[in-house]
Image (cartoon, rainbow, N blue to C red):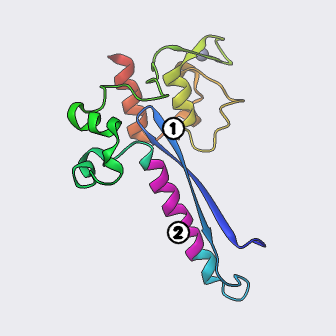
Amino acid sequence: MPHRYVKAIVQIRIGPYTRDGYGVSIMNGDPAAEPKLIRTAVDQAVNEAFIDAIDTYEMGWKDLAPYKLEDWAGNPALAHLQQSGPPAGVEDGAAPIQSFAVSNHKCLKCKENLTNAEWELLGRIPNLNRESLVYCFEHILAHLKRKLPEPVLTDFEEKRNS
Ligand SMILES: [Zn+2]
């Protein structure tokens, strides 16, 4: 606050992919005298961070490109994207996670390695420190399992049984 700026960092997760985005907002004025400046600056920084993160997914690029040919859409990579679309299931720098491949985290109880999906599932338990409470699906403590949002659990079980 002494420097009168706000920096926001957000992380967006879509399927197996996560993207970070950041935004910065400078306060023109004295936030101590005018506290409303803080709220506005935080809103702006967070909005900018979300736009930044979403932009790394190239969302909307293909749809907007025909209208921006004289501008950024002139670059050959984008022209290619317009003709062929993005490659299926592949993205620069991010291989899809093999959900049921084995992770390097071991269950505290049975000492078996968790699958990536089990490790992800632990991460969805609110307020759980999964670095210290590592359990495979069979051995997740019942009171912790109950904290999992229903859709997350259903999704996990569907994938597991397929
Ligand atoms: Zn276990």
In which quadrant of the rendered view does residue 152 lie?
Answer: top left
18 or 74, which lies in front?
74
Tag in front: 2 or 1: 2
Indicate the position of residue 57 as horizontal and vertical percent values: 41, 42
The answer to whether residue 91 is above or below residue 11 is above
Residue 146 circle label: 1
User: Which contiguous range is marked in magenta?
Assistant: 40-54
User: Disc 1 on helix, strand or loop?
Assistant: loop
In which quadrant will I find the C terminus?
top left
Q: Is residue 79 above or below residue 24?
A: above
> Residue farthest to the bottom?
33
Q: Earlier in the sequence, mark 2 or mark 1?
A: 2
- Relative image position of residue 98 (x, y in whole percent): 45, 18
Q: Residue at x 64, y 61 (%)?
A: 7
Category of crowding for the residue at label 1, using alpha-carbon neighbours closer than 10 angstroms: few (below 14), some (14–19), many (at least 20) = few
Give yes or no for residue 90 being in the magenta stretch. Answer: no
* Gap between marks 2 and 1 measured at Cα: 37 Å
In the picture, measured across the screen, residue 98 lies left or right of residue 77, that is right
Residue at position x 68%, y 19% from top?
108
For badge 1, the amino acid type reads Arg
Label ID, residue 44: 2
Picture layout, residue 104 above or below residue 77: above
Q: Where is residue 103 in the image (x, y as percent from the top left)?
A: 58, 17
The residue lying at 67 percent from left, 84 percent from top is 29
> Where, quadrant-wise, is the N terminus in this rendering?
bottom right
The residue carrying pointer 2 sits among few (fewer than 14), some (14 to 19) or many (20 or more) residues within 10 Å by Cα, namely: some
